[in-house]
Image: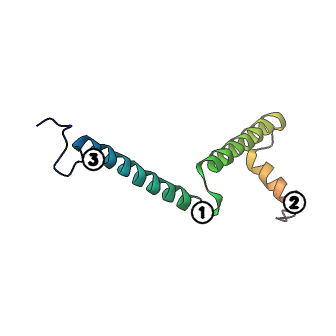
Amino acid sequence: MPAAAASPSGVSIEYQRQQAKAMRQYFQNMKMSETVEKAKVFGWTSKNEITNGRWVMMGFFIGLMTEYATGVSFIDQLKLMASYLGLVDLE
């Protein structure tokens, strides 16, 4: 009996395979969409994390270049910034 032959109920095995693959894909997509929704806690998505990391790298680079240009260490720059913003009283 060939693989694509109809069963006594009139449904071929190939049709059943196609439907099983479609159903499997459907449930994988459902699970993926649930995972994506759960990952959006407080706006933490991969795109936001990448953007945040790039801003941090740029700030760190600017701090290092300022240290190179002025001779003031990166930590002292942070202390000065905190002092200017009124967060810490260093005097």
The amino acid marked with disc number 1 is Val
Relative to 43, 11 lies left or right: left
Q: Position of residue 31 (x, y in %)?
A: 44, 56
| Residue 41, disc | 1
x, y percent for residue 69: 82, 34
Q: Amino acid at mark 2?
A: Leu
Q: Circle 2 is placed at which residue position?
A: 85
User: Which quadrant would residue 42 be assigned to in this image?
Assistant: bottom right
The dot on residue 16 is 3
Foreground disc of the pair 1, 3: 3
Q: Residues within 10 Å of mark 2 (few under 14, many from 20)?
A: few
24 left or right of 54 in image: left
Can you say whether 91 is above or below 72 in the image? below
Give the tally of numbered discs: 3
Name which of mark 2 and mark 3 comes first in the sequence. 3
Frontmost residue, 6 versus 78: 6
Which color scheme did the rendering employ for the protein?
rainbow
Q: Earlier in the sequence, mark 1 or mark 2?
A: 1
- Indicate the quadrant where residue 41 lies: bottom right
Q: Residues within 10 Å of mark 1 (few under 14, many from 20)?
A: few
Q: Of the residues tagged 1 and 2, which is closer to the observer?
A: 1
- Measure how far apart labels 1 and 2 are at the Cα level: 31 Å
Of residue 87 and residue 11, the one placed in the foreground of this image is 11
Mark 2 lies on a secondary structure that is loop
At mark 1, the secondary structure is: helix
Residue 79, image x, y percentages: 79, 55
| Residue at 84% over, 54% down | 80
